[in-house]
Amino acid sequence: MAREGAGLFAAFRVLGRFSGHVPHVLRYHGRHREFYLAAAVGRAVHTYNVKKLGIVAVSNTLPQDITCLAADRMLIFASYDNILHAFARNKEVVHSYEGHKARIHLLQPFGDHVISVDVDNVLIVWNIQSEEEYLRIDFDKAIFAVSALLHPSTYLNKILLGSEQGALQLWNIRSNKLLYSFPGWGLAVTTLEQAPAVDVVAVGLASGHIIVHNIKYDETLMKFQQDWGPITAISFRTDGHPVMAAGSPVGHIALWDLEEKKLMCQMQDAHSTAIAGMTFVPGEPLLITNGADNALRVWIFDGPGGTGRILRSRMGHSAPPTKIRYHGQNGKQILSAGQDGTLQSFSTVHEKFNKSLGRGSINKKKSKKKGLKLDTMALPPITSFASEVAHQSDWDGIVACHQGYITCTTWNYQKTSMGAHKLRPEKFSKHKPVGIYATAVDITSCGNFAVIGMSTGQVDVYNMQSGIHRGHYGEETAHEGAIRGVAVDGLNQLVITAGSEGLIKFWKFKMKDLVYSTKLPSSPSGILLHRDSGILGIALDDFTISVLDIETRKIVRTFSGHHGRINDMTFSPDGRWLITSSMDCSIKTWDLPSGCLIDCFLVDSAAVSLTMSPAGDFLASAHVDDLGIYLWSNRSLYSLVSLRPLPADYEPSLVTAPSTCPVQDVDVSGDEEPCDEMIEYVSPEQLGEQLVTLSLLPESRWKNLINLDIIKKKNKPREPPKVPKSAPFFIPVLPGLIPRYIPPEEENDRQSKVVNLGVLAQKSDFYIHLEEALSTNEYKAPLDLLKSLGPSNIELELRGLAPEGGGSMEVMLSFLRMIGVMLNKKYNFELAQAYLALFLKLHLKILSSEPKLLEELSKLSMQLEETWIHLRALFNQSLCVLTYMKSALL
């Protein structure tokens, strides 16, 4: 049975993937006046701007990994297997070309056409717009196996082909004629590159030779040789310096001076793997390189000696990561340890905040002298680490243990380097034991101490500031078997250790005394402590998970359902969920309060490590044989997600891993519809008749009803504004010897503004509903109408119930009965109080003179008193319990 709709986690993006084994492509955007770099990463094409090396676009993914890449002014061409695609606007596929029967390994844009060559030696010229074959040429693999392809500059309709046999051929594509054959040098051609000079081409050979050849006269101009194996890439500098760069399979770059015809300098270990692509930016002293070590680098040549230095770089792990953990509480950095021996920090915000803490080394000074390839001082890959941000600016805040190595290392996040201390037991300080190594580490929440477990069962404590050994747990060893996990609680009171013999032990952190020991049903493979809630997750070798409460020291939950070794666990920030990954390629989310499985999905490759953001917004995962770190968004934060327990016959679905995309382009507006099994809960108007229920109206609608006359009086202006009388053009005067002005006439015919409401009164809807309720005894309609009115309108309606306002005694009696119904049913409780208070204030004189109304009021008084006595008893009880909890010494 499969659940319909989306699960708890949705694919968001991948971190730490920048390059592959496919050579990059450099493009110039005329309108932007800027160079852009396109690199194939897995099944997508990433586009970076050269100026800042920031990612600007990510293409849609193809069904398989890209094996070949090329570009012209408008389109990017990418192929996988035997199919060629063209991307427009760095994003969507606009053309597809199918006709090859073998894998395409060479591409060359050619005006309105594109040329592709497959491994079966079939060359096809495609019309870009119509997607039709313009020309097909089959070469005999034994005589001429095409290994390189180039369009020589200014050679109209012509291409130059290099072969594994060493010969070169110049073809006219339009006439389908072989124009000239170059005998070659008897060695396989690996790369062809156009020189800045017309008619001159650089030919890279499998022997490490570079031939600068004039194809117009078939003359060799100069010849160079490298001792690092076949030439993988060639590029020419075009900013006025006659320099040629050549790449090698071992990651070195040689720079050749074309005027002096000699080696100018070497850039060793530019990449840890073969140089896949290498391009000089036209007119600038910048060299762009990429390799299969998952690195993009921009080198600038501005120093003496002609050598380059790194100007900008984007680098991830060159081997799959083995352990990932969020660093700090802001959820913006993920620390990752890889099989390449490096420790790196990846930002979830932007790639420019990524940091590499380098590779572990026994002696950093000797390692720098020897270089990457000959470094015998390099430490093995990190298997486990722990980090803490407290005091990280004062001393090292990360401790790590290495594969099969007894010494644990410290790392400094602020300095982005390996730390000052190497932590190992004192008895092994002079000699290196065989078969003894560190297996588990943890760091205290204050950042002062590191706890390290060994394969011998020994558990040691070290000071992070000084690196001094501060003791160990147990007389000789804490456990008889190897330590599978260590954890320290949030207050540095307890240390919890797990041994391979199946015991969980609790120790006093400071006194080092054993407090408690419990036996597990199977040997543990790892433990994880949620410090805030005191919940310990234990992964067992029988593929089950036990959850232990460190306060009661009892197992409170047991989860089973995985069918492979449990690789990692992580808690949600509130400690409600436990998320586990296993070698069965599943990622499961367990709800601890209910003890049920609430989410499960499958991935293509098993997740070896998991970590949940402290903010709860993302789940990060690292997978087998995958260089990236994948982010999964928590959909419960922005959409309606079912957290019901999954049925026993639930079949998880395979979820595609997220692809790289710029953060600003991702829209998580939450357009998803809730799944079919989600039944929206509608709260009833009243949960129970014995409960006092309040309305959902805001306080402004009822709280100030009794003081409405005071509010109106305060808001009333003291004196209304007077309009000045306009003076006449000719001022009238009285006739006579002494001129006198005529006094203004007084208006004596003033009309009274008092209106007799009884004459003009009309029955309102509220009045009509109250009249009808006298006979039906249904007061829902008048109450709903009153709830929809504002404070001023409510006062006006209640004033109109009196006889002098156009009302009647019967309607006033009906209103009091409506209040009685509200008090009986105990709903809209605060509205009943507010409406009754305003009614009494407005009509107190009339109510005191009418016996029927007085009788109804006495009933209401008894109801109010009874309800209030019950509420007061509950309030007093709650206040007593609260006061006791605050004052009692627990």
Image: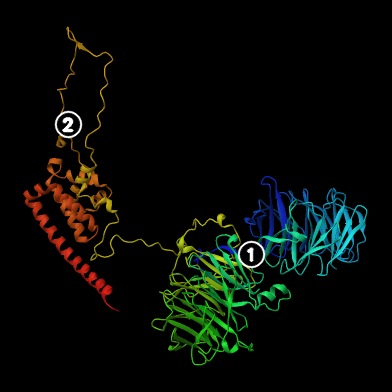
Element carrying mark 2: loop
Residue 646: x and y, percent?
A: 47, 72
Comparing marks 1 and 2, which lies closer to the viewer?
1
Q: Nearer the viewer, residue 805 or 226?
A: 226
Q: Nearer the viewer, residue 579 or 821?
A: 579
For label 1, the crowd category at 10 Å Cα-Cα, with few meaning under 14, some 14 to 19 and many 20 or more, is many
Amino acid at the residue labelled 1: Arg
Q: In the image as oriented, which residue stretches furthest toward the top? A: 737
Quarter of image, res 687? bottom left
Q: Nearer the viewer, residue 512 or 14?
A: 512
- What residue is shown with label 1? 17
Q: Is residue 837 above or below residue 489?
A: above
Residue 547: x and y, percent?
A: 45, 80
Residue 181: x and y, percent?
A: 92, 57
Quarter of image, res 407? bottom right
Label located before the other in sequence (1 or 2):
1
Q: How is the image coloured?
A: rainbow
The quadrant of the image that shows the C terminus is bottom left
Q: Is residue 743 above or below residue 347?
A: above
Q: Residue at x 16, y 54 (%)?
A: 817
- The span from disc 1 to disc 2 (Cα, nearest Å) is 82 Å
- What residue is shown with label 2? 753
